Image (cartoon, rainbow, N blue to C red):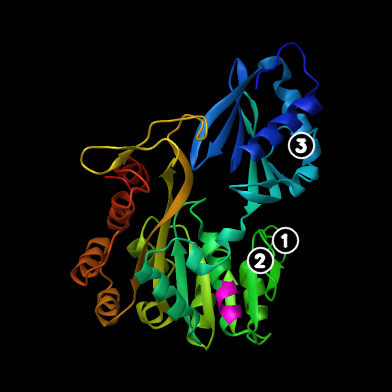
Amino acid sequence: MKHSGQPNIAQLVDSILEEAVQFGASDIHFEPTSTELQVKYRMDGTLKTFETLPAAIRDNVISRLKVLGNLLTYRNDIPQEGRIEGTQDQLVISDSGKVIDKRLAVFPTIHGQRAVVRIFYENDTLTELDKLGFNPTIESALMQFACRNQGILLLTGPAGSGKSTTLAALLRYILQQFSGKSIVALEDPVERAIAGVTQVQIEPHREMTFPTALRSLLRQDPEVLMIGEIRDAETAKIAIEAGLTGHLLMSTMHSGNCSGALLRLLEMNIEPYQVTSGVSAILNQRLVRKLCDQCKEKKPDGSYEPRGCKQCHNTGYHGRVLLAEMVELDGQVRKTILKQSDMEGLEATFESRGHMKLIQDGRRLINQGITTSTEIKRVCGT
């Protein structure tokens, strides 16, 4: 998509948003430089430049986005966040599903304002737990956790690794198995509606924060609680107490691996005995790109490599697949935590009990011809 002269700004922005949706992009980056405005789409987890716009219209493009997102157009010196409404919400894409939301974030830089639009899709194939692509061992463990009456499951992984999708699928599974259970979800923001779940929008900069809402909800007789993210010690303390007092609770934490999540709880001044008594399991997950079925090429050693075609925009990859590792807290792991061991100690304990790491789960996908060793290394490291 190329534009010459002075295009109609509204039409230009609409066309960029529409094209990104057609391509199934998860994010659109509008990145200012000293000479231009670069427009990049994140597709299958990687950024690719699709458009370069002249610096002369840079501010007008960002202003148009701010109008669509109901932001303050006259404030260029502060970060702002909003939601873009539009007819594209009804557009259905074969691979990514229907657009259910578009979030806008604007941030000032030395070359002008930088904007990112995040696009949320509702994909019918990713609503059921057994359709997410977990390996059989982890899928079985998650189903067993969902049938418990109390305990805590923590999900870790970077932004965009599918944690919210996994949590939503778990809640749906619980509803299918136990239709009468009282389930409440605290989210910032609410990403997708789940029938049968009471969902609460958390606004951290106002009075309704995670700790405030969680304290009050424990008096509302919930059986299952989902917290969008444990961000601070206060939320962690209340969550652990909930898991110890007859609630099934699941949440996310920012951590690179399972041992890191456990250590973060200890750093938040949660007592080791509370961690070992309250936390049931840690799930760490990533999304890796799938080889394009139209153009992948088999090598002599039996593995596949990407080639590139029109279908995959010459990347060699199309779509993504789940990669995961899970640690359940058994007696050996609990003893290590009670000793307040460091990360090396925890990792050694995991290894001694046959823990399957992310990169080992990746080998399963390589052997099945779903992805490549290069992609696994890109996502997991060496």
Helix, strand or loop at label 1? It is loop
Q: Which residue is mark 2?
A: 209
Q: Is 167 situated above or below 316?
A: below
Residue, disc 1: 206
Report how far apart the C-alphas of labels 1 and 2 lie in the structure.
Answer: 7 Å
Q: Three-letter amino acid code at disc 3?
A: Lys
Q: Is residue 105 visible?
A: yes
Foreground mark, 1 or 3, reads 3
**Extreme top residue here?**
5
- Residue 172's disc is none
Residue 182 image position (x, y, % from top left)? 65, 83
User: What span is in magenta?
Assistant: 171-176
Assign a secondary structure to mark 2.
loop
Horizontal side of 227 relative to 145 (left or right) equals: right
From the image, tell me which residue sits under label 3: 66
Callouts 1 and 2 close, C-beta under 8 Å: yes
* Along the line of sight, the residue nearer the viewer: 73 or 43: 43
Compared with residue 358, is residue 376 higher up or lower down, i.e. above or below?
above
Residue at image coords 52%, 72%? 250
Q: Locate residue 352, reporting x and y percent.
A: 18, 70
In the image, 48: left or right of 296? right
Residue at point 55%, 63% (across, down):
229
Q: Quadrant of residue 346 in the image? A: bottom left
Q: Residues within 10 Å of mark 2 (few under 14, many from 20)?
A: some
Q: Are marks 3 and 2 in contact (CB under 8 Å)?
A: no
Mark 2: amino acid: Thr
Quadrant housing the C terminus:
top left
Q: Residue 46's spot in the image, x, y percent?
A: 48, 38
In the depicted structure, whether residue 243 falls above or below residue 158: below
Residue 118 included in the magenta stretch of the image: no
